[in-house]
Amino acid sequence: MRAFVLTKYKQPLELTEVEEPEVGERDVLIRVEAVGLNQLDEKIRAGEFAQILPYALPVVLGNDVAGTVIRVGRLVESFRAGDRVFARPDQSRMGAFAERIAVAEADLALVPVSVSMAEAASLPLVALTAWQALVESGHVGPGQKVLIHAGAGGVGSIAIQLAKHLGALVATTASAANADFVRELGADVVIDYRAEDFEAILSEYDLVLDSLGGENLAKSLRVLRPGGLVIGISGPPDPTFAKRMGLGVLVSAAIRMLSRRIRRQAWRLGVAYEFLFMRADGDQLGRIATLVDEGVLRPVVAKTYPFEQIPAALADLAAGGGRGKIVATLES
């Protein structure tokens, strides 16, 4: 089968023939029909995560998939051939940029009946990120104040909708050109990041979801109420992440040092910082699918490319500035 393979960090992906995926007893073999592209894919290609996610090269990239079940492993109970499914495969089994992929049953969910395969493929990683940040870690509820940075982006566009559904007052940063778009998604307060300083406008927020890092992350700490929480998805990784990933002593020590400054700043302000590296979860994805079919969440697909043009799509993604997600589709 054909797949896009990373043979060397910082080099373009290569479309080549690879072996068929092995299907374990609890695995589901999927004919890939659409894949979502994420900043994670580009960061892995560029080698930015080589120290904390040391993939053995060559490796097939791709972290979002939607398609049809071909066959299932002997112990699979929830899916059968012909089912339309979607997933964010476990990070150790990345490989969606291929014609077929084997995914663990526990990581899969049925595609929402109200959306196309391309729309379904745009959802798993960003929607699970939003869910795990707002529901699982943030415990967001009615009346809380939530700031979501980069509201027009892949994660932001879903997180705004989810936070609004949970009853929060939602602020977001976006360009002036995207102001009406993020308001349509549910944002109550829109800050033009090019012309306004969100730190000077916002205060007493319960939670910030930061996808930018750097100085933006440090400023986000200062808009929180005492006891508030910033969840960062661009880093720096923290000691809890190192422990969860089972990283070695040296890498764990390096991560502790990398996040020391931001954790110390948070402590001094009486707030908290948490790094989120989302995980695959089919049960959560099933709940998200229900919200999509109920009209609570809508996928946002900026552009669709043919499968063969995934390298060009990744370059487009790296350039930034788009709304929602970029997707690539395969002919049946």
Image (cartoon, rainbow, N blue to C red):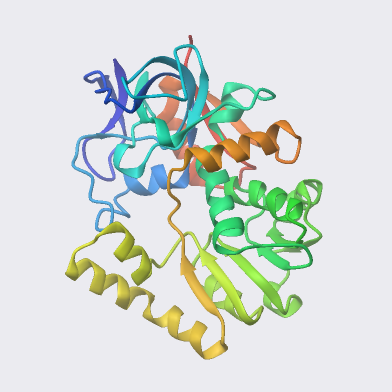
Q: Position of residue 128 (x, y in %)?
A: 53, 46
Question: In this rendering, is residue 208 above or below 117?
Answer: below
Where residue 145 appears, x then y in whole percent? 73, 68
Judge from the rendering whether residue 328 lies leftward or rightward of residue 55; answer left or right. Answer: right
Residue 326: x, y in percent? 55, 34
Residue at the image position 45 percent from the left and 79 percent from the top: 262
Residue 325 visible, this orientation? yes
Q: Nearer the viewer, residue 11 or 94?
A: 94
Corner quadrant of residue 290: top right
- Look at 69% across and 50% down and name the residue there: 162
Side of 58 relative to 200 (left or right) = left
Q: Could you tell whether 70 is left or right of 250 in the image?
A: right
- Give the farthest residue toward the top: 332
Q: Quadrant of residue 15?
A: top left
Q: Position of residue 169 (x, y in %)?
A: 78, 63
Residue 194 in sight here: no
Viewer-side residue, 271 vs 11: 271
Looking at the rendered image, the quarter that the N terminus falls into is top left
**Number of marks in the rendered image:** 0
Position of residue 29 relative to residue 13, above or below, is above
Relative vertical location of residue 54 with respect to residue 265 in this rendering, above or below: above
Which residue does the image show at 25% across and 59% down from the upper left? 246
Q: Nearer the viewer, residue 194 or 138?
A: 138
| Rendered residue at 30%/65% (across/down) | 243
Residue that sits furthest to the bottom in the current view: 268
